Amino acid sequence: MKIGIIGGGGVGQALGAALLTLGHEVTLGIRTPSSEELAKPRPQGKPLAEWSAATGGKVVTMAEAASDADLIINATAGEASIAALTLAGADNLAGKVLIDLSNPLDFSQGFPPALSKQYSSHTSVGEQIQAAFPEAHVVKAFNTVGVGIIVNPGLITKDHDLFLSGNDAAAKATVTELARGLGWKSFLDLGDIKGSRAQETIVLVWLQVMGATGSSLHNLHVALA
Amino acid sequence: MKIGIIGGGGVGQALGAALLTLGHEVTLGIRTPSSEELAKPRPQGKPLAEWSAATGGKVVTMAEAASDADLIINATAGEASIAALTLAGADNLAGKVLIDLSNPLDFSQGFPPALSKQYSSHTSVGEQIQAAFPEAHVVKAFNTVGVGIIVNPGLITKDHDLFLSGNDAAAKATVTELARGLGWKSFLDLGDIKGSRAQETIVLVWLQVMGATGSSLHNLHVALA
């Protein structure tokens, strides 16, 4: 599959590398893919020139990454996502599956962070992306775990779930198949894109559990009676 | 143990009944324990006169329930909790374990609800109760599951966790022992009372999972690599 990742931080880099290994064609889109920018370290990641050399993945503009792709992954920070996807271009997103793995975190008062106010009460980034790009098929997924588990879910040997939500059943099926390729086995469909409200709150639980356990390699399982 | 439950709704009734069965002395405190009030149906519960007749538990004022008890359980709605505990009396809470199982839900825009704004950004009900009653040993617990699981955790046969947080280690140990009596086996200590921020967001996940699965009999398990 031709996949365009919007955002060049550590999450996009690791997910892109894993998808390239699985045989997908992956381009990674950033605002300014100049050689100067490619030489800079990225948030929680390495310089993208190094990433390209190591993985064979190309780094292009956000619009180029989106226009060439069959499926697009938003790997930007939640508060920056709509601006980034606007640069990617509504026309380039139309009719395509758009996986949103962002979280809108407000660290202004230290740890633990809160969800950003404009995205946390009766709304969510996932819903606002779907509203801003109504022709895209937004699926909220992969935002509830750290990147170490996103790309290697088998590190956790007990049952654990990939939460996803979105308005389009076919798009959710596409994301489920992509995730199976990464090794995911258990899925919990939270319904339409309003489910991203619950998914975005999970990051607060995730961070608190990381603080309590000292590990980023954890995930939730919903156990039913 | 002498236990005072503040709040006469369905959760307090069911938890009180379960604790009475285990041999604890339980009184249930409401604002006005008149015979007229005891005859009225309660939120998600039955008339308290029926509850008393069925369980042998007494219904008294909030202050009486708190003053007689060794351990106090706040089973009121999150937005009403501080007012109710003020009626229970700061002096009656001082030096005692106070289990807070409340959640501050805002259903003003329908389902799914949000957390109430005054309790959801860089704060929580648990923390505000601890700040309002600094001599109580507040432990946030039991707010992350439905009452059917609170009183009968064995209905879920797979591993699942009781989350708890609070500033006092001995108080958390007391709550853990009380929960073991109800059948709880797995515990996740999220640290000091700030952990109640994460715990109170879990109710949004819980509600969404209930919508997706059609069951209230579910709980989370944190799976570690």
Image (cartoon, coloured by chain):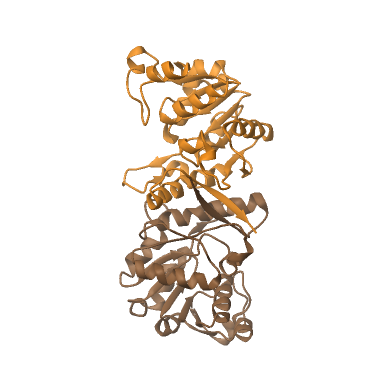
Chain colours: A orange, B brown
Q: Which residue is farthest top?
A: A35
> In the image, what residue occupies the spot 58% across and 65% down?
B153
State the image coordinates of residue B7 (x, y, percent, origin top left): 51, 74
Rendered-image quadrant of the C terminus of chain A? bottom right
As drawn, A69 above or below B78: above
Q: Quadrant of the N terminus of chain A?
A: top right
**Residue visible at 55% across and 79% down in the picture:** B22
Picture coordinates of residue A119, whole percent (x, y): 46, 41
Specify the quadrant of the image occupied by residue A84: top left
Q: Position of residue A61 (x, y in %)?
A: 45, 16
Q: Is residue B75 visible?
A: no
Instruction: Identify whether B109 is placed above or below B25.
Output: above
**Number of numbered discs:** 0
Please determine whether, in this image, residue B18 is positioned above or below residue A92.
Answer: below
Res. A46 visible in picture: yes
- Taking the spot 59% from the left edge, 70% from the top edge, the residue there is B43
Give whichever of A48, B11 is nearer the camera: A48
Residue B152 placement: quadrant:
bottom right
Q: Residue B107: percent from the left, percent from the top?
A: 55, 55
Q: Is residue B90 left or right of residue B147?
A: left
The answer to whether residue B177 is left or right of residue A34 is right
